[in-house]
Amino acid sequence: MRRRTLLGTLAAAAVAPAVSGTPAEAATPTRYLGMFREEDPSVAAANVRHLYGVTPASVMWFDSWASGRPFPVDEARMLWRRGIMPHYTWEPWDTALGPNDPAQIHLQDIIDGSWDAYITARAREFAAVRQPILVRWGHEFNGNWYPWGIANNNADPSLYVRAHRHIHDLVSATGARNVQWVWAYNNGSSPDTAYNDPAAAYPGDRYVDWIGIDGYNWGFGPSWDPAGDHWTTFTATFDAAYAKSRAIAPRKPVMLGEFASTEDGGDKAQWLKDLDTTLRSGAYPDLKLLTYFDLTKEEAWSPNSSPAALAAFKIWVQRRYMNGRGHELARIACS
């Protein structure tokens, strides 16, 4: 109830969804642009505006538990002053250790209360923002590359559920009712086995506000398969994962917590044009927020990886149906 009251106060500040002059775009559901850049959140927001000509509806950043860093309350407030919803990816690990290192953080440690003091401290900071924030905890749990992955926790999805609920309840008890919880899985499970089906790790509607999906067009010769061709269209990347989200929690809104395309093995500009065409068609009606991974890391994910890709990206993000604002975004999960 407190979240509904808080979000109700945003109504006067919200910007009405833009309407295109073309019938096809006018019928397209409003979508919201999220961006991740490896910069301080407020700097990232400014650079997105400078580079791509748009203000994103949300800006995402990452932090690991072992860093001990406080949540950047002032940064989050600064984003809200610009009408941008903060999106915090909260990773329960020590980045200096391997996933199965005995000293690593694992789900049982969280369940047993070893991290309660840390969680409570961050919860107080969440509450201090006094505006809605997205918290994406323990993402891609159906992969084997993170220590919180089900594959690295006795192949037992119930441990993930218990850890998620424990964290949620601690944060809520501390008074941070402004948090919107993002439960996010990878578009493919590794390993692809029954215990690793995301459905088995769903904490329940009471504990989740958004369903998140991560997925990338890896193209030809990614680091994990140098001779393989993994070029996939936007729809091939997300069709099955989106359908799964509607089967697991059909009343929850959906976001792409991370997505991008490489340049290797195909036409990235065309990939982005096809993405635009797909969204303008009204496909994936419950997909609201799309967070682009603007970084050259394993691959050249950044939109400016080529002039053609940059031009296509700018056309897409400047479409009127992509003009959803942060204040509107904050209300979606509570409607």
Image: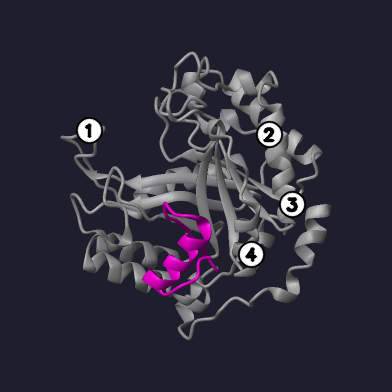
Residue matched to label 3 = 128
Depth-wise, is mark 4 or mark 1 nearer the camera? Answer: 4
- Mark 2 or 1 closer to N-term? 2
Instruction: Check if mark 3's residue and mark 1's residue have beta carbons within 8 Å.
Output: no
- Mark 4 or 2 closer to N-term? 4
- Queried whether the magenta region covers residue 50, the answer comes back as yes
The amino acid type of the residue labelled 4 equals Trp
Is 215 left or right of 312, judged from the image as shown?
A: right
Callout 3 secondary element: helix
Residue at mark 4 to residue at mark 2: CA–CA distance: 23 Å
The amino acid type of the residue labelled 2 equals Ile
Instruction: Check if mark 4's residue and mark 1's residue have beta carbons within 8 Å.
Output: no
Q: Badge 3: how crowded within 10 Å, few (<14), some, or many (20+)?
A: some
**First to last magenta residue range:** 30-56
The amino acid type of the residue labelled 1 equals Asp
Residue at mark 3 to residue at mark 4: CA–CA distance: 13 Å
- Mark 4 or 1 closer to N-term? 4
The reply to whether residue 201 is in sight is yes
Number of marks in the rendered image: 4
Residue at 65% across / 32% down in the picture? 164
